[in-house]
Image (spheres, rainbow, N blue to C red):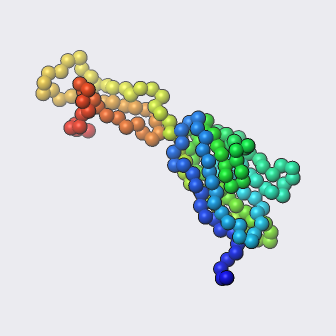
Amino acid sequence: MTGCDGIKMKGLLAPKWVNTGESFRLLCDYDLGRDAMYSIKWFKDDTEVFRYIPTNQPLQYKSFQIPGIVVLEKASKPNNLVLSVTGAKGSGTYKCEVTIETPSFVTLAESTKVTVMTPPLTPPKIEGVADFYTPGDLVDINCTSLESKPAAALEWIINNQKVSNFVL
């Protein structure tokens, strides 16, 4: 058989969107080949979140406090990190980094973006409404929804009918 029998990074599986208060799973897919693992580390925006070093006795696992997420240690495994989202700061780039043992200490990494969905904190605000209109009046009204991710989809409904023809 020809080819490399060493470590290969296959990918990082993660949801694209999560909600505040939910838990989500990151799966680091790799193949060590004939190599031995030195460590697997997880990062959020280049800040370490979780590490597993099999030769560290008795503490093989270590997690770190990061704003926006909590590591669920009991549900996590070295290549399978489970996080609980505590707020919008949980959005970011997550990375799995696998390092093999001596003599080479090769490190491979894979990353992906996860965005925390946040609903608007307040109802939409409508501005510019007059007390009275006559048929044929040009109406200039603004509807704004603040601080949601992704941006809130707004639509106008007049007399229980969705408005489809309007100029922006």
User: At x 31% / y 34%, what residue is drawn?
Assistant: 155
Q: Give percent across and percent down for residue 161.
A: 24, 30
> In this view, which residue lies farthest toward the left?
136
Does 116 appear above or below 4?
above
Residue 19 picture quarter = top right
Q: Give percent across and percent down for residue 79.
A: 68, 55
Rendered-image quadrant of the N terminus? bottom right
Compare residues 139 and 59 and report the one nearer the observer: 59
Q: Give percent across and percent down for residue 29.
A: 63, 60
Q: Is residue 12 visible?
A: yes
Q: Give percent across and percent down for residue 127.
A: 32, 25
User: At x 24% / y 33%, what residue is drawn?
Assistant: 163
> In this view, which residue lies farthest toward the bottom?
2
Does 65 appear above or below 146?
below
User: At x 41% / y 26%, what residue is drawn?
Assistant: 123
User: At x 58% / y 38%, what residue is drawn?
Assistant: 22
